[in-house]
Amino acid sequence: MLHNTFDQDPENSLIFVWTEAYKNDDAFIAHLANPAVGEYLQEHSKLADNFTVEVYGTVGEKCLEVMKKTGVPFKVFQSKLGYSRL
């Protein structure tokens, strides 16, 4: 992981955004393979009705398949301006 922040929404104190940046798909896949991360993400659905993991950037097919297999609600926003990753 290259970057990690946890921010509170300035307009709603009950909404939080956790931002992480990865070097490439393999780094993100390795992060998802960590059992502690999987357990942490699974617990979110018990705490919030509208929990979603948003992914921005250029995401490969292998990474998309891994995300689907987690059972976590991912929403992917593919880059339309060429290669990028956040």
Image: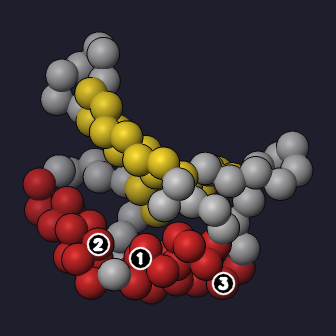
For disc 1, the marked residue is 32
Mark 1 or mark 3: which comes first in sequence?
1
Inspect the image, locate mark 3, and give the three-letter code of the amino acid beneath it: Lys
Labels 2 and 1 touching (C-beta < 8 A): yes
Specify whether 27 is left or right of 42. Answer: right
Residue type at mark 1: give it: Leu
Most distant residue in the left direction: 47
Mark before the other along the chain sequence, 2 or 1: 1
Q: Is residue 41 visible?
A: yes
Question: 76 above or below 26?
Answer: above
Q: Which residue is mark 2?
A: 37
**Number of the front mark, 3 or 2:** 2
- State which quadrant residue 78 falls in: bottom right
Confirm or deny contact between disc 3 and disc 2 (CB under 8 A): no
In the rendered image, residue 76, in percent from the top left (x then y), is placed at: 59, 57
SS class of the residue under badge 2?
Answer: helix
Rendered location of residue 54, percent (x, y): 49, 52
In the displayed structure, does residue 3 sit left or right of residue 42? right
Q: Residues within 10 Å of mark 3 (few under 14, many from 20)?
A: few
Please give the name of the residue rendered at 72% of the width and 74% of the height, measured from the top-left corner.
Answer: 60
- Residue found at x 58% / y 83%: 65
Give the residue pinned by disc 3.
62
Colour setup of the view: secondary structure
